[in-house]
Amino acid sequence: MTGPQKFSLSLLISAVVFAGFAVWSYAGLYTTIETSFFRGRVEESVYKQVKDTDQAVAAYIAALEKDLAAFFAQDFLVNTYRINQAGEDIVARKSAIETLRQQYSINSIRMFDLAGALHESTRLTDIKEQTPAKSIEWVARSDLQSEVPLESILISDASNRAVRWLMDEGSNQLIFSVPVIDASQVVYGTGVV
């Protein structure tokens, strides 16, 4: 084979290969190769992020459940259900509730008795009347504004001692239902956070 024939054959093969790659590229086959090459790593990365997020959320909820159970077992919070509350209990309760709200970015805290009557709340809409002497009359249960039905979160019997939580999909928030238990293991009501 002569030099010009070799050159012509080489040029012909190059043109055919180039045309093949051009058709392959135009048909979108390169993206298929790229997608299949990167897809495994992307899926693995997303799965790892979801798994890490799930573990972080589970750890946060477990810590919050533990802290809320300990919080609502404090004497000054249990004393909320007494008719005559000591002034230092009221001050300690207000301070502790505000600290908890800041620590966990909590929107509101409510305390109900076993019958469902409201005894404490951080929501201004729950106050029916407040006297100059700082005495507060709470709104009746039937008039309360709640994201979820109160029946689904209130503890109605003293045998239920577990911290429960549910997701309010409307406001995209977690709502915790915590039994208020004193030192002698008597259940007084429910703390709703």
Image: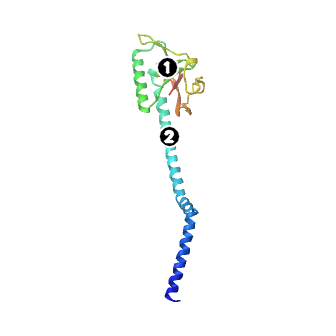
Looking at the image, which residue is at 43% across and 28% down?
101
Residue 186 showing in the rendered view: no
Query: Horizontal and vertical percent for residue 139?
Result: 52, 16
Q: Kindly identify the amino acid type of the residue bearing the numbered disc 2.
A: Val
Query: Horizontal and vertical percent for residue 111?
Result: 51, 22
Note whether 128 is above or below 182 in the view shown: above
The residue nearer to you, when weighing 164 against 12, is 12
Dot 1 crowding, Cα within 10 Å, few <14, some 14–19, many 20+: few
Circle 2 is placed at which residue position? 57
Query: Horizontal and vertical percent for residue 3?
Result: 49, 87
The residue nearer to you, when weighing 10 against 32, is 10
- Residue 169: name its quadrant: top right
Residue 125 numbered mark, or none: 1
Note whether 51 is above or below 122 in the view shown: below
Q: What is the secondary structure assignment of the residue under circle 1?
A: helix
The residue nearer to you, when weighing 31 against 132, is 31
